[in-house]
Image (cartoon, rainbow, N blue to C red):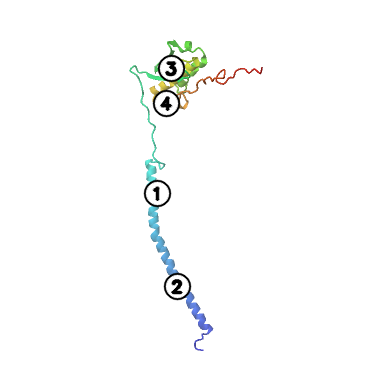
Amino acid sequence: MADKKSLSDLGDLTSQAAEAPAAEAPAVAEAAPAEQADAAPAGARRDGGRGRKEKAESDNGVSTQGPQTEAVLREQQLDKFGRAYATGRRKDAVARVWLKPGTGKIIVNGRDQEVYFARPTLRLVINQPFEVSDRAGQYDVIATVKGGGLSGQAGAVKHGIAQALSRYEPTLRTTVKRAGFLTRDPRVVERKKYGRAKARRSFQFSKR
């Protein structure tokens, strides 16, 4: 019966086992803050370094989205007489245009624009590049045009004036290009097809 323990002895053993883990817990708790304190400065150094680097990049004006290219300004193109030359095309018409500073006088095939282009709409067309760029009445134009009709010739002169203006003042190229005046209009007459009266017009049908 000596090996058997009483209830009081079992109570003493359980109280000692509960005190042992409780004594170890403060030691573990003291070790954890020390480890966090050691790791915190390293993380702070990493984050702080990256933050300083990003701030330095922003202060220097460097973009983080890759290299940026600046728009290259074209050079002024003039002949020995100080004029800008360009060729304009529309339908079957081809115009040669010389542009220089002046009072807004436009000569087409040796005649004034009001005589050569009698219709006001045609004169409005050839002056569009000057209206868009706010240069109305500041340049004189001498043009020779051949081929096509009056409408096509007016479009060719307009195309040539826009090209010449962008060569005399390269800074106006963006304004004139956004208006679509530097692009050659590709629309031309559709060819006639065999078996038809015109490009698409059929012959009159007779049932009998």
For label 1, the SS is: helix
For label 3, the SS is: strand
What residue sits 43% from the left and 68% below the top? Answer: 28
Q: Earlier in the sequence, mark 3 or mark 1?
A: 1
**Mark 3 highlights which residue?**
95
- In this picture, residue 195 sits left or right of residue 71: right
Q: Quadrant of the C terminus?
A: top right
What residue sits 44% from the left and 66% below the top? Answer: 29
The quarter holding residue 138 reads top left
Q: Earlier in the sequence, mark 3 or mark 4?
A: 3
* Number of other residues with Cα within 10 Å of mark 3, as a class: few under 14, some 14 to 19, many 20 or more: many
Q: Earlier in the sequence, mark 2 or mark 4?
A: 2
**Mark 1 highlights which residue?**
51
Q: Nearer the viewer, mark 3 or mark 1?
A: 3
In the rendered structure, which amino acid carries the disc numbered 4? Answer: Arg
Q: Position of residue 117 (x, y in %)?
A: 49, 13
For label 2, the SS is: helix
In this view, 54 is above or below 129: below
Q: CA distance from mark 3 to mark 2?
A: 102 Å
Q: Position of residue 173 (x, y in %)?
A: 42, 26
Q: Position of residue 116 (x, y in %)?
A: 47, 11
For label 4, the SS is: helix
Mark number for residue 23? 2
Question: Extreme front residue here?
Answer: 208
In the rendered structure, which amino acid carries the disc numbered 2? Answer: Ala
Using the rendered image of the protein, determine whether residue 135 is visible from the camera's viewpoint: no
What residue sits 45% from the left and 11% below the top? Answer: 112
Mark number for residue 173? 4
